Amino acid sequence: WFADADVDGLADNLDQCPASDRRPTVIIDGDNTAVANVMFTSGCTIADLVLAEAAGARNHGGFVSGLAHLLNALRDAGIITGAEKGRMQSTAAHSSLP
């Protein structure tokens, strides 16, 4: 037995995101992007990474810029498509985050 607060199968002491957003799609500021919320071996989901960008940004422009870099990396790794990147980027640009 091990502690697993978000029930993702990864022990909390190894989980980089022990309270993961495990919804099936990425939701940005209440808007559903319809992009699959992939979970990584780190225990983090795409939604977790988006929220981390928002939390670390000084302002909305910084969030949108940082998210663009993250989404480019996910697209380049074949995790999301260019169209999915565009949907998430547009949703983020129209959000009130951070």
Image (cartoon, helix red, strand yellow):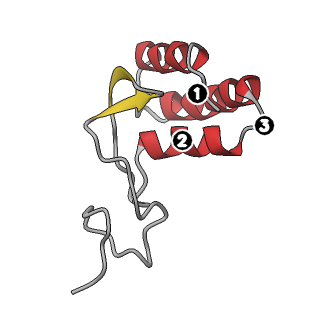
Name the quadrant containing residue 96. Answer: top right
Q: Secondary structure at mark 3?
A: loop
Q: Earlier in the sequence, mark 3 or mark 1?
A: 3
Residues at marks 3 and 1, CA–CA distance in whole angstroms = 21 Å
The reply to whether callout 2 and callout 1 are in contact (CB within 8 Å) is no
Q: Is residue 93 left or right of residue 36?
A: right
Outermost residue, right side = 58
x and y percentages locating residue 81 in the rendered image: 41, 21
Which residue is denoted by mark 1 in the rendering? 72
Q: Which mark is residue 58?
A: 3
Name which residue type carries label 3.
Arg
Name which residue type carries label 1.
Asn
Which residue is denoted by mark 2 in the rendering? 51
Q: Is residue 32 left or right of residue 53?
A: left
State the residue at coordinates (45%, 14%): 87
Near mark 1 (Cα within 10 A), the count class, few <14, some 14-19 or many ≥20, is some
Location of the C terminus by quadrant is: top right
Q: Secondary structure at mark 1?
A: helix
x and y percentages locating residue 91 in the rendered image: 50, 16
Name which residue type carries label 2.
Leu
The reply to whether callout 3 and callout 1 are in contact (CB within 8 Å) is no
State the residue at coordinates (25%, 64%): 7
x and y percentages locating residue 6 in the rendered image: 31, 62
State the residue at coordinates (37%, 47%): 21
Q: Nearer the viewer, mark 3 or mark 1?
A: 3
Q: Earlier in the sequence, mark 2 or mark 1?
A: 2
Residues at marks 2 and 3, CA–CA distance in whole angstroms = 13 Å
| Total numbered badges shown on the rendered structure | 3
Q: Secondary structure at mark 2?
A: helix
